[in-house]
Image (cartoon, coloured by chain):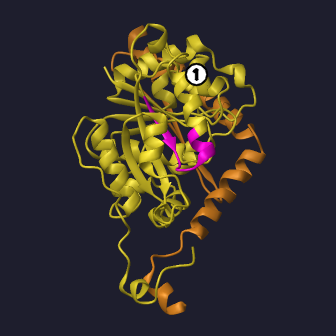
Chain colours: A orange, B yellow
Amino acid sequence: MNLFRFFRPAASAPVARERLQILLEYERKSGSQVDLFNVLREEILAVVSKHANVDPDKVQISVDRGPVFSTIAVDIEIPNSGAKVRASA
Amino acid sequence: MGKVIVVTSGKGGVGKTTSTAALGAALARAGENVVVVDFDVGLRNLDLVMGAERRVVYDLINVVQGVVKLPQALIRDKRIETLFLLPASQTRDKDALTEEGVGRVIAELRTKFDWVICDSPAGIERGATLAMRFADAAIIVANSEVSSVRDSDRIIGLLDSKTVRAEKGERMEKHLLITRFDSTRAARGEMLAIEDVLEILSVPLLGIIPESEAVLRASNLGTPVTICSTDSAPARAYTCAARRLTGEDIAMTIPTDKRGFFNKLFGRRAA
């Protein structure tokens, strides 16, 4: 049968297993990471808001959960005229 | 204004989520702006089939409740630019979705996308009725098998009575998608024939998706089958079905998987 395996595309089940492991580990911790993301979002927003006018609806958060670490990216749209320092000068 | 389509079946495990992902990806590959929406609150899986499970932050309920705006919850597909996912929530509280809130979100999605494809949960409870509530058209996913056909009939009844369109006295556009079709078993008379299913349900046929290992492989990899293995029989069948949705007139065929030389030589796999 190994001969046949040679002609077949790489097995997909190991990929499925790894994806499930990462996902379930996160889901069993249920919620804690969502809270972390929300806290980070609020605090980062607060810091940026000190210096610029930011519309909270223009903040885009994206995450990528990996087996060892996760990444979070926060995109904040700052209007060119929104710098508070300049506005008060 | 985009078109809202609900993918529904009544019965579980017939291939709603697979079909939502495959049709959504096929339409998006053709250049359409598509969002696939998971309505299976508490048991979401569309994110997994789309391969976006690691990237979910917000979900449909967050948008309905106004925690975030719609663009903040949409996840853009990494392979196709015009394909987006709105995930379901994992909360156990099914009442978190309100009819008014869902209506608002669907109305907004309609303005942003050409196609809004709603993946309904199984059953005929609230989640399923909310998923179909604001739809312009329905894809009824069924297998050639008695319980699936019976459940499809119940769902057709709901589509004709519980949707906004039905209540306004308008016609609900319906399409039947037969999935997991095994032509060998059908030829042996072990499965209901397509013609019988069509006659019983009297809904026009959108496509016949053959049973294939390519579908399992696609969900293992988290890639809709219409992106994962475009030459496979189910991918070709789904692509044709997507083109029929856009109004193209394509002859109905049941694609078959091409067998490799060795597989042909040494016979088929055990059934």
- Magenta stretch holds residue A57: no
Nearer the observer, A13 or B234: B234
Q: Is residue A66 left or right of residue B111?
A: right
**Which residue in the structure is indicated by mark 1?**
B130
Residue B214 location (% of width, % of height)? 46, 64
Tell me the residue at 40%/22% (across/down): B136
Q: Which quadrant of the rendered structure holds the C terminus of chain B?
A: bottom right
First to last magenta residue range = B138-149
Residue B15 location (% of width, % of height)? 54, 48
Q: In what element is the residue under mark 1? A: helix
- Magenta stretch holds residue B145: yes
Observer able to see residue B54? no
Q: Quadrant of residue B168?
A: top left
Nearer the observer, B96 or A64: B96
Nearer the observer, B215 or B85: B215
Amino acid under disc 1: Leu
Q: Which quadrant of the rendered structure holds the N terminus of chain B?
A: top left
Tell me the residue at 46%/89% (across/down): B266
Tell me the residue at 24%/35% (across/down): B247
Residue B191 location (% of width, % of height)? 53, 57
Nearer the observer, B73 or B99: B99
Query: As displayed, is residue B94 above or below residue B239?
Result: above
Query: As displayed, is residue B158 above or below residue B141?
Result: above
Q: Quadrant of residue B230?
A: bottom left
Observer able to see residue B25? yes
Outermost right residue:
A29
Tell me the residue at 51%/15% (across/down): B103
Query: As displayed, is residue B202 above or below residue A2?
Result: above
Classed neighbour count for the residue bearing mark 1: other residues with Cα under 10 Å, few (<14), some (14–19), many (≥20): many
Q: Quadrant of residue A38?
A: top right
Tell me which chain the residue with mark 1 is part of: B
Outermost left residue:
B249
